[in-house]
Image (spheres, rainbow, N blue to C red):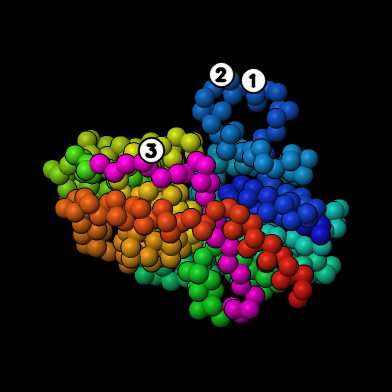
Amino acid sequence: MRILVSNPSKQYTPFLIQALLKSGHEVWFATSYWYRSEHRILRWLAKWNQRLATELKKKQDKSIPEKIVLTNPWGTLYKFLGRFIIRDVERWSYYEDRIHDRWAKGLLEKFQPDMVIGYEKSCLDTFQFARQRGIKTILDLAQVHSGFIQQLRQQTSFFSSITGTERLFQTIHRLKQEEYGFSDQVVCLSNFAADTMVQQGFPKEKLHIANLGFDPKRFHPKVTYNKPDILQLIYVGIVTRRKGIHLLIELMQSIQTLPVHLTVVGPWGDATDILNAQSNYSNITYIPYLHHEVLAERLRQSDIFVLPSYLDSWAAVVLEAMACGLPVITTTQTGASEVVGNDAGFVLTAGDTEGLKNAVMHYFHHPEAIETHGRNAVAKVQGYHWSRYFQQVQRVVDSSCSN
């Protein structure tokens, strides 16, 4: 089958493409920017600028043949210059998605695929044109139903400020609603994400679940558990209120006299101001970026993984932490919490500050629980390798073909 995969960014799409290639499909990947090995000038600059080298490394994936990657020159230009023109991140992202969608639509005429898999918020025009041409459409739902996000904006004060102005949000909300209508099938990352679709009235028979996996060669269990002199917590993800980082920082401020330390790993986000305000506290360390191999070792050196998120459709880093032997403290609004359960950590209600503190203090007062829950975590996560995701993706494609 001839399949066009469309995503202006990268995210987990390389694994989706690997799944399709392994199943023998002919695949093209349409994206805004991709760092190609023949870019001699960029290769040369990267040798002299470590920051640029790190950024470029994120814009390529050696598992994908470069010959199947299609890039939009206008999308590339906007990706590099748009940030300086439009300061509003949500608006900048919206325009990037629209530029990409209109370009990707034209690729259907050129390549005439049998199926197009589009990343949410960036495939409405593509799906409309595909429907006219009888091309199958599969929506890759990276988040949750937009109606659920609308509820969060109403229920949680800071959510409006991090999801755009009311006018922009409603524009995106309507766009997503239309995308749902032009989707033959929708792939969700978790039961949590699928449930939000059903709750908003989307047909359950059109939903499929494909859980992102982890690499067991990189993320393998720690060998020993020693009673820590200082309880080492670790958070991995963008520094945003959406992931509850502000709750963690507030917690660390309240227990700064105790031997508990928090390491935050991830790029700057809307909560960077809060993190900077706590920079004088010796119980918090901030690391903007770690490559996977280094991150895995850092996880094994830690005791507890904490992600008190208000919204994460999956959060593959939860699996990576569990694979390294860490108990996990997370929330019911994190998709991967379904793997954690009640015997490999704590699953809290989002925003439960008291529950978060109690969970951390449980491990502080009962350090033997770290090993018990950590070994349970390793056992529970073993069924979530990338091979499982590949199989789930293939079932979605097969289902779409039979309908």
Answer yes or no: is residue 171 visible.
no
Q: Which sits in the foreground, 369 or 78?
A: 369
For the C terminus, give its image quadrant. Answer: bottom right
Q: Nearer the viewer, mark 1 or mark 3?
A: 3
Q: Which sits in the foreground, 264 or 383?
A: 383
Q: From what the image shows, is residue 9 above or below residue 341?
A: above
Q: Which residue is mark 2?
A: 48
Q: Which residues are magenta?
A: 202-226
The circle on residue 44 is 1
**Label 2 sits on what residue type?**
Trp
Pointers 2 and 3 in contact (C-beta within 8 Å): no
- For mark 1, give the secondary structure: helix
The circle on residue 298 is 3
**Label 1 sits on what residue type?**
Trp
In 3D space, how far apart are the residues under numbered discs 1 and 3 (Cα atoms)?
Answer: 30 Å
Going from N to C along the chain, the mark reached first, 2 or 3, is: 2
Say left or right for 76 vs 108: left
- For mark 3, give the secondary structure: helix
**Label 3 sits on what residue type?**
Arg
